[in-house]
Amino acid sequence: MIRSHLILLVEDNPDDAELTLRAFKESKTLSAIVVATDGEQALDYLFATGSYANRDPKITPDVVLLDLKLPKVDGLGVLQRMRANSRTRRLPVVVLTSSNEETDILRSYDLGANSFVQKPVDFAQFLIAARQLGLYWLGLNEPPPVTRRI
Amino acid sequence: MSGTVLIVDDSLTVRMDLTEAFEAAGFRPIPCVGVAEAREALTRGLVDLVILDVLLPDGDGIEFLKEIRESASTQAAPVIVLSTEAEVKDRIRGLQRGADEYVGKPYDSGYLVAKAREFLRARRSSAAGSKTVLVIDDSATLRDELTKALEPAGYIVLTAASGEEGLQVAADQRPDAVVVDGILPGIDGATVIRRVRLDAALRGIPCLLLTASEDKGSELRALDAGADAFVRKEEGAAVILARLAAVLRGAASTKPAEDTASLLGPKKILAVDDSMTYLQELADALRGEGYDVILAHSGEEAIELLAVQSVDCILLDLLMPGLGGQETCRRIKATQIVRDVPLIMLTAMEDRKAMIQGLGAGADDYISKSSEFEVLKARLRAQIRRKQFEDENRRVREELLLKEMEASEARAARELAETRTALVVELERKNKELEAFSYSVSHDLRAPLRSIDGFSQILLKDCANMLDAKGMHHLQRVRAAAQRMGELIDDLLQLSRVGREDLSRGHVNLSGIARIVATELGRNEPERAVEFDIPDELVVDADSRLMKVALENLLGNAWKFTSKIASAKIAFGAEQRDAGTVYFVRDNGAGFDMEYADKLFSPFQRLHRDADFPGTGIGLATVYRIFDRHGGRVWAEGAVGKGATFYFTISSARLGGLHDS
């Protein structure tokens, strides 16, 4: 049985968003990708509030790819709110960012990130990263039961 | 006021007179005929004060004084030597052996009782707590010897091996007294004392100068510098101890409240004249007034005496053989500790010129010997009273000045603290700015590069059929530039991080790190065959992360610059040199021209064309900063075509740079 996967990509830079979508497309990962362009939108999507008020909140993504530098609510703020809510507490979050500052890495893990990946400048490297992320988080990784659905 | 007074005198008249006088004043006198009896009395109980004759039937009073000073139970007791010996040299001998006072016979019993009271009051006020004494001497032996002598006597001893160190200790610990050697390697003893006197907080500390020579000049210079007393080293620890006790007592007795009362207290007059007859006449007249009179026969004697004995007024004959009144006066007035003592010039001549000369030499007043003694006494009282008022005025002025100085010091300290706080705030702000800047560089500068590289590659792929070979080449150039800029950003960030992050030191196995780096290099270019020589267990005390960065750069460079060598060899190791362990990374690659060796470690300096060996020129600047922060250094040796060796050192954590946390 082929499972259809859902990824929430939180990314404010349209170039990065497009490149990420392209990378997942090229990696042949069978998944739908929802893009949120700021932290507030991401939270609205996850909790089915605001512009996503009509969405079925039971449908949750398999993994959230989260940029740190975001307008309105920043990445760490999103992570904090997710971990404070029972519905998203266990949802796998991969921080995907340009930064490799030690403080960013430490604070991400402290707030409960499951993984930290620096976006490579080299697109070829970025393709490799996207493929590996898809393989691992959508294939190998066993998600927490509540997020599981067909 | 009560107290036990030991009176040692072979004359029955003296014993009876003094016993009566002290009893009437509320003391408990113990009269003794000689040394044996006095010694016996001392074994029976504690004595508060000793009155001691010099010429005793069974011994020398001054020798017995030495005994008193060497015994722990009596060394602190004030001793007043009472002697018929009018010679100045006897007086000096007594005072140097530790007498607190030397009174000549015939004496005035009222004066003795008053002096005894003054000493006991001073002792009581100074008895609270043990005294701290700072010993400054470059000889460790003498420091030890003095410490051993002073500590059993209840002193707390601080030591310093040089004048500079001594002043530092004095400023920090505020000792009650300073004992300083005259001859010291850096600044000498006299200079130490002068600096103590110039310091508002220290100037009241009694200073004792140790001299090795018989050279009176050096002693006078020391007194001029403000020493309270001096002792010749060869006189030994016991004498030093005695003089120290005396200056401490002296310091305690000059406390303001007691000084104010001392206008009515016993006064000591030094009379200097070559005529014995006149001196005796003068002494008799003055003793009748309750003064204690010291007689000196020449200017030289007077100056020698003033070095060990303080007086309240000096009567000085103008015409004397030897030094002469005018020169004696000039010298006295040039010496700091005695220059304020009123000095009255005496002369037989009714000579206006002589009078002017005397006053010109610094005398405070001038009296003709032919005047009535009543006139002289009146002038004397006037001078002593004038001195008294001056002292009081000066004390008031000094107190005001001291308060003003304290206020201005407090103001300066506050301003300094405010300035420092402002600087710290400014520094923190700059650091935050720098961190924000670095963060922005790391995050925002990379994103557009990813777009440039990403879309170039998509273009190459999606639109390959629309691009000719030239177009493809241009796009490849765009991609290469974007990647190079990415590397530059990474290297710059690393350089900045290495400079600002805290060091966390620990045991670091350099060999292990070198092996990991070598394996990574081999994995990235598996087609290259490079022979690595890395010994086991080179362990240092350093920051492991920074050591990894340094070795990545050094071994990475060696790897890069051997890329055109068929049998590349890279060695990492350590050598023992005089200055310590020197580590090295050596290769047999392209090498460099030693002429440019100093440019290697500056950022963006490159000695090779990018087409030959690509690089950002930041790696070695990072390496330099890493070893600098470890209190070590890095340098390079090499020759074109003959390889390069990079050496580095790491100092232990204790000697590390200021940045270490």
Image (cartoon, coloured by chain):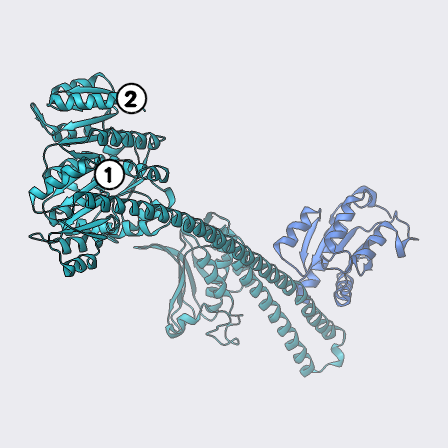
Q: Which mark is residue B26?
A: 2
**Label 2: chain?**
B
Query: Percent x, y for residue B425?
Result: 58, 57
Q: Are marks 1 and 2 in contact (CB under 8 Å)?
A: no
Query: Residue B269, how many percent across, how many down?
Result: 20, 41
Q: Residues within 10 Å of mark 1 (few under 14, many from 20)?
A: some
Q: Give the letter of the chain under mark 1.
A: B
Q: Indicate the amino acid at tag 1.
A: Lys
Viewer-side residue, B138 vs B560: B138
Q: Residue most toward the right?
A: A54
Q: Residue B376 location, x and y as percent?
A: 19, 45
Q: Amino acid at mark 2?
A: Gly
Chain painted blue: A
Instruction: Please state the horizontal and vertical placement of residue B184, each as a whole percent of the image.
Output: 22, 50
SS at badge 1: loop
**Secondary structure of the residue carrying numbered label 2:** loop
Residue linked to disc 1: B267
Quarter of the image with the N terminus of chain B in it: top left
Residue at the location (16% across, 45% down)?
A: B372
Q: Does B18 sit left or right of B133 as displayed?
A: left
Asked whether B154 or B496 is in front, the reply is B154
From mark 1 to mark 2, how far is it between C-alphas? 22 Å
Is B653 situated left or right of A29 in this image? Answer: left
The image quarter in which residue A96 lies: bottom right
- Chain letter of the cyan region: B
Question: Seen in the image, is B121 located left or right of residue B334?
Answer: right
Q: Is residue B145 visible?
A: no
In this rendering, is residue B594 above or below B511? below
The answer to whether residue B8 is seen in the rendering is yes
Circle count: 2
